[in-house]
């Protein structure tokens, strides 16, 4: 097991640092100094700003400094847009809001999708199964942006107007960032995060339910299901013990691979709801040309993607003893 992990890590290390290299090269196609100073800037202003931003150094040194920050996980480079703040400080401030969306969305989506797919597979070909498949396909066919717009209008604006109270917020208020942990759980999260999480779950359930249903339908035709049925095992035991246990490998694959896409999918949610998470911060950094934040945040997202793939293979061996990672 450990030798396999070491080999996989050794294989992904050059891939990871190549991603960092390509990102830094792509950012430097257009000189950000001219965009910040304008066309009337003098040569002295250009030289001074380039030295202030650290762009006067050779690219090799800039790349080496970025690699150092990633390896040590310090991210001590100064942000270009936030005076006096390092990238690490901005990153720590954004991690919490992002996790407040992605973790509940991942848990709820997985539990609901697996449960619905089990019911759909068990009653396949019947009215209930067809109805669930129809709803899943319908959910997949609608754009993520449409869900956000309708969620903001009907789920927040109209609902608040009907109830006569501010149940859901359409946009995040900066003062909510100063809440204590208790206030965050009881007041801030239900008001600002519950609606985005619900939208994320609704969008993802269509894709996940269809995938899990296909897995469950395949498992329901196995010989061990027929044997268990002939022995008189109850439907619940067959579904949630025999079938679910043997379908864990594709389920684990889907859940773990979903993690990086769930994070990138929260970009739109954070953007339209004004949530100060990593996705929203990265988009603002791209618009303003804040190279240190773009480089560091991209490095974090790339690491999450690579580690999720590695975690998938490790969980295979833990769930199924037939899998050998040698």
Image (spheres, rainbow, N blue to C red):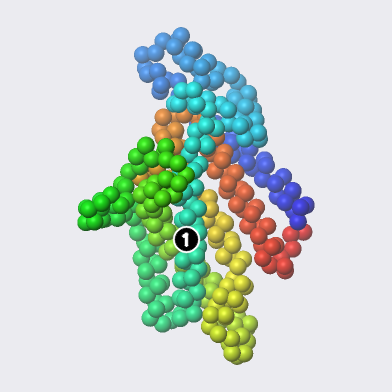
- Which quadrant of the figure contains the C terminus? bottom right
Asked if residue 21 can be seen in this view, the reply is yes
| Residue nearest the viewer, comparing 18 with 151 | 151
Q: Residues within 10 Å of mark 1 (few under 14, many from 20)?
A: some
Question: On the image, numbered disc 1 is attached to which residue?
Answer: 108
- Which quadrant of the figure contains the N terminus? bottom right
Residue 251 lies, with reference to residue 284, above or below; the image says below
Left or right of 28? Residue 312 is: right
User: Horizontal and vertical percent for residue 60?
Assistant: 63, 25
Residue at the spot 22% in from the left edge and 53% down from the top edge: 164
Residue 58 lies, with reference to residue 162, above or below; the image says above
Residue at the spot 41% in from the left edge and 50% down from the top edge: 186
Left or right of 68? Residue 101 is: left
| Residue nearest the viewer, comparing 65 with 153 | 153
Residue at the spot 61% in from the left edge and 85% down from the top edge: 228
Left or right of 126? Residue 240 is: right
User: Horizontal and vertical percent for residue 275?
Assistant: 40, 42
User: Horizontal and vertical percent for residue 117?
Assistant: 48, 71
User: Horizontal and vertical percent for residue 207?
Assistant: 45, 63
Residue 173 lies, with reference to residue 32, above or below; the image says below
| Residue nearest the viewer, comparing 165 with 32 | 165
Displayed quadrant of residue 179:
top left
Residue at the spot 67% in from the left edge and 42% down from the top edge: 13
Asked if residue 266 can be seen in this view, the reply is no
* SS state under label 1: helix
């Amino acid at each position: 097991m450990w030798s396999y992990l070491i080999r996989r890590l050794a294989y992904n290390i050059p891939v990871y640092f190549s991603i960092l290299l390509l990102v830094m090269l792509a950012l430097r196609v257009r000189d950000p100094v001219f965009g910040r100073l304008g066309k009337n800037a003098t040569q002295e202003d250009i030289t001074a700003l380039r030295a202030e931003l650290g762009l006067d150094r050779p690219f090799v040194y800039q790349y080496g400094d970025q690699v150092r920050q990633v390896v040590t996980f310090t991210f001590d480079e100064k942000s270009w847009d936030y005076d006096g703040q390092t990238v690490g400080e901005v990153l720590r401030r954004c991690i919490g809001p992002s996790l407040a969306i992605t973790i509940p969305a991942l848990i709820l989506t997985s539990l609901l999708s697996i449960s619905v797919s089990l019911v759909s597979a068990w009653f396949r070909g019947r009215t209930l199964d067809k109805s669930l498949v129809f709803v899943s396909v319908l959910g997949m066919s609608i754009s993520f942006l449409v869900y956000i717009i309708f969620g903001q209008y009907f789920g927040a604006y109209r609902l608040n107007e009907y109830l006569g109270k501010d149940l859901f917020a359409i946009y995040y208020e900066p003062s909510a960032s100063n809440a204590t942990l208790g206030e965050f759980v009881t007041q801030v999260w239900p008001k600002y995060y519950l609606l985005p999480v619900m939208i994320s779950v609704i969008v993802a359930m269509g894709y996940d339910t269809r995938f899990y249903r296909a897995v469950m339908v395949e498992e329901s035709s196995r010989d061990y299901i027929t044997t268990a049925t002939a022995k008189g095992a109850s439907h619940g035991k067959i579904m949630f013990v025999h079938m679910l246990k043997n379908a864990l490998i594709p389920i684990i694959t889907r859940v773990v691979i979903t993690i990086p896409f769930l994070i990138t999918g929260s970009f739109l949610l954070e953007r339209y709801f004004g949530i100060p998470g990593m996705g929203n911060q990265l988009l603002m950094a791209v618009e303003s040309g804040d190279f240190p934040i773009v480089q560091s945040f991209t490095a974090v997202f790339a690491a999450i993607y690579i580690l999720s793939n590695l975690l998938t293979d490790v969980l295979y061996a833990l769930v199924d003893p037939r899998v050998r990672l040698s």
